[in-house]
Image (cartoon, rainbow, N blue to C red):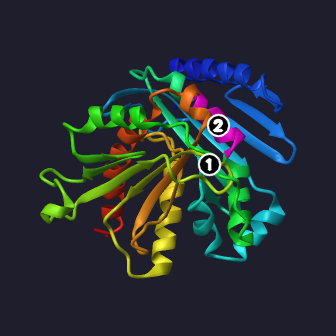
Amino acid sequence: MVSTGEDNAAEQLLDGLAVAFSATDFALTREPGSLLAKQGSISTRIWMVSGEESDSPLGPVKCVLQIRSDLPAEMAGMILAKPEAPEFMNRMATLGALTLDGDRWFVGARITILESDNAWNIQAPLILMSVIAARESLLGATGRALSGHTMEEHSSEWVESDFDRVEDFFSARCVCSRGNLGFVAELPLEPGAICAMAGDNRTALWSIKGDEPHPELGGGLFCKLELPHQLSDGSRLHEVLQQLNQLEMLPHALPPHFGAWCVGKLGNNPAYVSFLPNALHDAARGIAVNMTAWAWGRAKWANATLASMGIC
């Protein structure tokens, strides 16, 4: 059950989001526990969901918000007709994953906000952008990929000093390196795991890059978490990826879910991708550090979840 405190906190956050959306051309409907934003055929609901865990290792949970954009029935039917389509589309995800709920497809994101969090200046822009860009950018990117048409490239707002900041924060915590417009880190999944080059196969590879534009949105920050787990059965891999995207939507004390699980660079491993549009650079300053911290938590959660499925 959601406590009165959690209820009040969520209502206040939803009120704040409604004010922020009032500056856009979305039509808003504010109801207890939810906010509905519509723009043309786009209909997205942000709602408070009951947290299944009132506490986490990091402390009490303030509230959990889900962001869900349902796909039109005809579009969902096209996806169902091609089993490989959801995974293909999720490779180009921005801030939401194409996810199945029963027989309905939606683009979903989730944020679990802790009592100790003091990052609404980053969390609110993420939520707003997930509504504004996620579904249309996902569908637009898929159309461009299928047609072969590419968007005119725009440079990223993330510059070398942004990657310096991430390296400064994590260099004492893990093996990492910094390139011109990028940062790469090996995130230990188990105690004692350090680096794949040292023979460890229990590290996840995290990278953020400012020189890999999105097919639809252009410049921004591309983020990718590669897990070392490999599945030889392709059908099983796609099934696991969909399960991970579904589990990400549950009201658990997990890192914010603004991205999608898809096939990794090995061709048989799970990976989690996000893309932050340029608008988030100034609107959510320092977000690259947060994304890296969340990736580490997500890697450990995914490692444990896959182990429970018998995948090591």
Determine which quarter of the picture holds residue 174. Answer: top left
Q: Give the residue displayed 27% in from the left and 32% down from the top.
A: 168
Q: Give the residue displayed 55% in from the left and 42% down from the top.
A: 156
Numbered disc 1: secondary structure: strand
| Label at residue 129 | 2
Percent across and percent down for residue 99 are 61, 58
- Specify the segment rendered in magenta: 124-133
How many numbered discs, if any? 2
For label 1, the residue is 108
Numbered disc 2: secondary structure: helix
Q: Give the residue displayed 78% in from the left and 23% down from the top.
A: 23
Crowdedness of circle 1 by 10 Å Cα count: few (<14), some, many (20+)?
A: many
Q: Is residue 306 left or right of residue 220?
A: left
Q: Name the amino acid type tagged 2.
A: Met
Percent across and percent down for residue 287 are 46, 33
Q: Give the residue displayed 58% in from the left and 33% down from the top.
A: 280
Tell which circle, 2 or 1, labels the residue nearer the N-terminal end.
Answer: 1
Q: Nearer the viewer, residue 163 or 81?
A: 163
